[in-house]
Image (tube, rainbow, N blue to C red):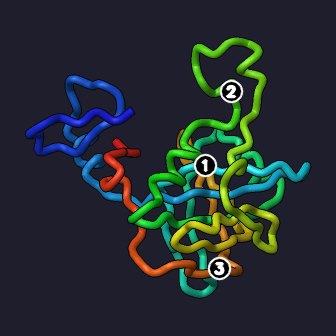
């Protein structure tokens, strides 16, 4: 949950911190797009997750970088199949897709849950209009745009892994602008 500080010159921040160090304040000032990463396991299980840290890093070949937490189900699936999709959310209604997938798929990642709940896995594709890319990863039909990637490199980066993928197919589904975390009032940084 993001905390807003009325009249503050600082961006909204997660949790309820009382004091922020200068470096954390400067990192929180950056703006990111809100994306949904689609992945598929070797057992044909599908997953969706929110990702802010996504960017193109090369023209030839067309490479993108996605930073994913080391304990994420999506990262496990990407490591297995060496493929994923990036779904860009639309500024007008992307918040609905973001809300649908923001919670972890695996109950064990939610602190304080009972043993029986922690063993459950929620299928985030349930109720969402979707298809699949040629690489088998989910495409959200209500996204602004999407692209599918084949993994070229996995680079450890602290508590995240940087996934470098070659964009192999994609489409602009609608006109308009991409949703950013600032428009959601969310932050992922610092």
Q: Is residue 189 left or right of residue 80?
A: left
**C-alpha separation, residue under disc 2 versus residue under disc 1:** 14 Å
Classify mark 1: residues with Cα within 10 Å, few (<14), some (14-19) or many (20+). many
In the picture as drawn, the residue positioned furthest to the right comes out as 43
Rendered image quadrant of residue 105: top right
Figure check: 69 above or below 66: above
Q: Is residue 174 left or right of residue 166?
A: left
In the picture as drawn, the residue positioned furthest to the left comes out as 7
Q: Earlier in the sequence, mark 2 or mark 1?
A: 1
Figure check: 6 above or below 18: below
Classify mark 2: residues with Cα within 10 Å, few (<14), some (14-19) or many (20+). some
Viewport quadrant of the C terminus:
top left
Which residue is denoted by mark 2 in the rendering?
Answer: 107
Query: Which numbered dot is residue 170?
Result: 3
Q: Position of residue 171 (x, y in %)?
A: 61, 81
Rendered image quadrant of residue 17: top left
Confirm or deny contact between disc 2 and disc 3 (CB under 8 A).
no
Rendered image quadrant of residue 155: bottom right
Q: Position of residue 63 (x, y in %)?
A: 60, 75
**C-alpha separation, residue under disc 2 versus residue under disc 3:** 32 Å
Which residue is denoted by mark 1 in the rendering?
Answer: 49
Query: Which numbered dot is residue 104?
Result: none
The residue sitting at 88% across, 53% down in the picture is 44
């Amino acid at each position: 949950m993001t905390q807003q500080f009325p009249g503050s010159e600082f961006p909204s921040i997660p949790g309820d911190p009382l004091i922020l160090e200068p470096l954390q304040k400067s990192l929180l000032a950056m703006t990111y797009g809100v994306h949904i990463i689609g992945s598929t396991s070797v057992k044909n299980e599908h997953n969706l997750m929110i990702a802010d840290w996504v960017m193109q890093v090369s023209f030839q070949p067309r490479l993108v970088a996605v930073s994913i937490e080391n304990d994420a189900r999506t990262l496990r699936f990407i490591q297995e199949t060496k493929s994923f999709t990036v779904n860009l959310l639309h500024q007008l209604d992307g918040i609905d897709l973001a809300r649908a997938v923001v919670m972890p798929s695996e109950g064990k990642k939610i602190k304080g849950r009972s043993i029986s709940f922690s063993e459950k896995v929620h299928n985030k594709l349930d109720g969402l209009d979707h298809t699949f890319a040629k690489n088998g990863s989910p495409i959200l039909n209500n996204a602004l745009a999407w692209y599918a990637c084949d993994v070229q490199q996995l680079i450890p980066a602290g508590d995240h892994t940087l996934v470098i993928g070659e964009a192999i197919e994609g489409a602009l589904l609608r006109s308009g602008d991409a949703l950013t975390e600032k428009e959601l009032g969310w932050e992922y940084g610092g």
